[in-house]
Image: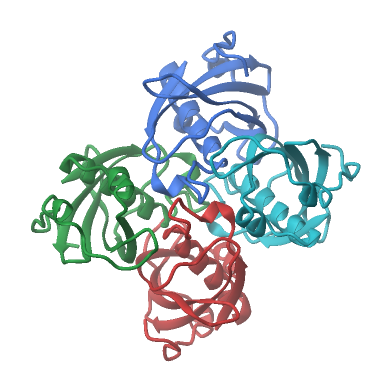
Chain colours: A red, B green, C blue, D cyan
Amino acid sequence: MGTITLRVNYSETDQMGVVYHANYLIWFDRARTELMRETGLTYRELEQQGVYLAVSEVKVRYRAPARYDDLVQVRCWVRELASRRVTFGYAVERAGTGDLLATGETALLSLTHEHTLTRIPEHVSKLLTPIPDPVRL
Amino acid sequence: MGTITLRVNYSETDQMGVVYHANYLIWFDRARTELMRETGLTYRELEQQGVYLAVSEVKVRYRAPARYDDLVQVRCWVRELASRRVTFGYAVERAGTGDLLATGETALLSLTHEHTLTRIPEHVSKLLTPIPDPVRL
Amino acid sequence: MGTITLRVNYSETDQMGVVYHANYLIWFDRARTELMRETGLTYRELEQQGVYLAVSEVKVRYRAPARYDDLVQVRCWVRELASRRVTFGYAVERAGTGDLLATGETALLSLTHEHTLTRIPEHVSKLLTPIPDPVRL
Amino acid sequence: MGTITLRVNYSETDQMGVVYHANYLIWFDRARTELMRETGLTYRELEQQGVYLAVSEVKVRYRAPARYDDLVQVRCWVRELASRRVTFGYAVERAGTGDLLATGETALLSLTHEHTLTRIPEHVSKLLTPIPDPVRL
């Protein structure tokens, strides 16, 4: 499980006074990066080895708004692993209360530098162990 | 059908040399805004009347990358309409070739200024006529 | 002079109900891209020739707020040209009224693909003709 | 002095392989928020008291690029204080090495909720003590 805690910045709000919905995808990305760092292989190193993970599918359910200056926790885990594809799950919660703000899922495809599909190398796939969803997506 | 044509800006690219995936949600938003304008009631006017449409669900399938300086067309249409919820569909295509780059869907809930659920007013819902999906999502 | 007209999107607003200030740099970039296209050499082509223009300095003065759904015009022109550096000026105006919303300036350095300073090629510099500022910056 | 440490996210890079320049304004904002928190009055509280600080001027000098997954430190301090205006300085450094990546300055005007100029309240201005620039801007 990769977990980040972030402070909502003014730039992330919109005129409804809440976090603009596209920002959650960026939060997911940040949590996914930390999940990979914790496995012992950072995504930066993976790209240096010539393996790119490109987002091919995204789903988000927004449950409660996040607001400016809120402290928010984002958890990320591996949901499914296939030879060329890995799916991550996400839960966004208000830090402190644990209120669920959003859940989501992203599927990523393994690509070469030339953007053609390729198998996830074995030394990578063995680091990406799927776990049962800790919350219902 | 609301349609926009946009030019991919440098700010929308990432170091993979393609458009960063979160930007598609912004493109969807821009196309949705034009769809509403064409119905004769802009989203700005709707908010001035005290009705807010907040994104509650998002799905995107990325099919081919968009790149810097590409001309891209985004089409938006109403998929489903319920008393408090409206669902929009989206198709992102390369202008000129018509290659499908992404498809997606967003569900929006009708809220009051105090962020409580409310019925979509009848003068609004009658402008939001669902049509069959022009492409498979 | 490169000129773009853009519609302020919801994603560009913040909870103050106006356009978040960092977005103006993106608008400048979009206008600069169109200025270059009009010279007959797009920035995309310039990068394909191995010349990169990297922003080294930015100044913006915000004079009046832009709001959601406003139509905004951004003008861009060349202010100064040196062997390795080009400076652009910008004016952001409300379309229709011509009210001045912001002015700005960016300096860009000419870099190779390896990010070392290089002369702006002559076939490029002769396209970038400085003009007197049309508005006071 | 307000200091934040941040990890460069993929969303912040562009196809030149470095952080897109507009993101530095967002980093400045995050550092400024923490500076105010440390004075004992958060910017959120200030807005709740009806005082808004709107950016009226921005200057940035980019000195060296930041890259994906870099750890970056942003320092923020008060440069000048007037009755209706406060100016902040910023230094962006690579964490660890201390290499200077960028410096900048923003001026903010004190506004009421109706966006008219107003004096910075005394209980606020006494928290905003200018200090000499720790680096040359």
As rendered, which of D103 and D122 lies closer to the eye?
D122
Measuring from the top left, give residue A126's x and y in whole percent: 51, 85
Residue D100 lies, with reference to residue D39, above or below; the image says above
Q: Is residue B133 left or right of residue D52?
A: left
Q: Is residue D87 left or right of residue B87?
A: right
Residue B16 in view here: yes
Residue B122 lies, with reference to residue C74, above or below; the image says below
Residue D22 lies, with reference to residue C89, above or below; the image says below
Residue B114 lies, with reference to residue C24, above or below; the image says below
Residue D73 in view here: no
What's the residue at 50%, 43% (across, down)? B11
Q: Quadrant of residue B6?
A: top left
Quarter of the C terminus of chain B within the rendering: bottom left
What's the residue at 31%, 54% (across, down)? B64
What's the residue at 33%, 46% (across, down)? B48
Q: Is residue C72 left or right of residue C114?
A: left
Measuring from the top left, give residue C137's x and y in whole percent: 63, 19
Which residue is situated farthest in the left direction here? Answer: B132
As rendered, which of D112 and D89 lies closer to the eye?
D112
Measuring from the top left, give residue B95's x and y in whole percent: 25, 39
